[in-house]
Amino acid sequence: MSTVRIEDELGIRTITLNRPERRNALVPEMQEELIAALKGAESAGARVVVLAGAGEAFCAGLDLSALQGMAGQSAEEHRVDAERIGRMFRALWECDLPTLAVVQGAAVAGGTGLATICDFTLASPEARFGYTEARIGFVPALVSAYLALQLGDKAARGLLLSARIFGADEALRLGLVSEVVERGQLQTRAIELATQLMANSPESLRATKRLLRAQQAERLDRALALAMEANAASRQTADFREGVAAFLEKRKPVWK
């Protein structure tokens, strides 16, 4: 794999988003490789999956080059892109193994989604989160389905509509982060937690995760179907084109 690094050791599969020069921003190849890494974890003998980011950031959301190319895409290309992002989040949500995110820096937009969909999220005090899509005329559609499920409607609206950046302590209070850990101790704490999880019955953990998913399946399926449409549709709007242009040109957008 060229954008994701996989390490399997002592029952722990560590999947590292490996584009540090781009703050591990998401591109289609990384999305597909992450899906494959998650789906292949159990067959490789893993008992726990740890998701991490190389370098200073966890994941900065969609890559600038991907944003640049979106403005000229057809409706069908937008739909394919939306479906791939949906499959990426779904692969993480539906992983039968316990999942643990280690967030040492920025986790923005889709990066916040990846970090907080995991069963456990460890964050350093310097970590930053935010559903910033509205700043560029985009709709945080797919992550909204999971966020509303986790926090409830009112709290989700506050984060999605404000598009603000918030810190690790606030994420902890909201319940999006499990623990705030000093940066130098993140890996040690991740191994401790993974070891604790592996002391439990593997079948019980799988069955518990399946049960929890089944209890939310109908609501989530309905929300994701709507989100997929909203994601693709928002990419064809004038606001999205202006937002992306302003982002690339490093200026404030002029909304109509």
Image: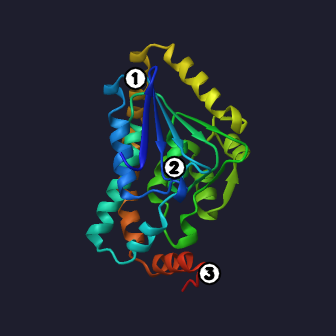
96 relative to 78, above or below: above
Proximity of marks 1 and 3: CB atoms separated by less than 8 Å: no
- Give me the disc on residue 113: 2
Proximity of marks 2 and 1: CB atoms separated by less than 8 Å: no
**Badge 1 local density, few (<14 within 10 Å), some, or many (20+)?**
some
Query: Which residue: 67% across, 58% down?
Result: 165
Real-space Cα separation, disc 2 to disc 3, in angstroms = 26 Å
Q: Amino acid at mark 3?
A: Arg
Q: Which residue is mark 1?
A: 206
- 146 left or right of 157? left
- 124 left or right of 1? right
Q: Earlier in the sequence, mark 2 or mark 1?
A: 2
Residue 102: % across, % down: 58, 38
Residue lying at the far left of the rendered structure: 76
Give the camera-side residue of 196 and 152.
196
Q: What is the secondary structure assignment of the residue under circle 3?
A: loop
**Badge 2 local density, few (<14 within 10 Å), some, or many (20+)?**
many
Kindly report which numbered mark, 1 or 3, lies closer to the viewer in this rendering. Answer: 3
Real-space Cα separation, disc 1 to disc 3, in angstroms = 48 Å
**Badge 3 local density, few (<14 within 10 Å), some, or many (20+)?**
few
Q: Which residue is mark 3?
A: 251
Query: Which residue: 42% across, 37% down?
Result: 6
Q: What is the secondary structure assignment of the residue under circle 1?
A: helix
Give the camera-side residue of 204 and 15.
15
Q: Is residue 60 visible?
A: no
Proximity of marks 2 and 3: CB atoms separated by less than 8 Å: no
Residue 38: % across, % down: 38, 37
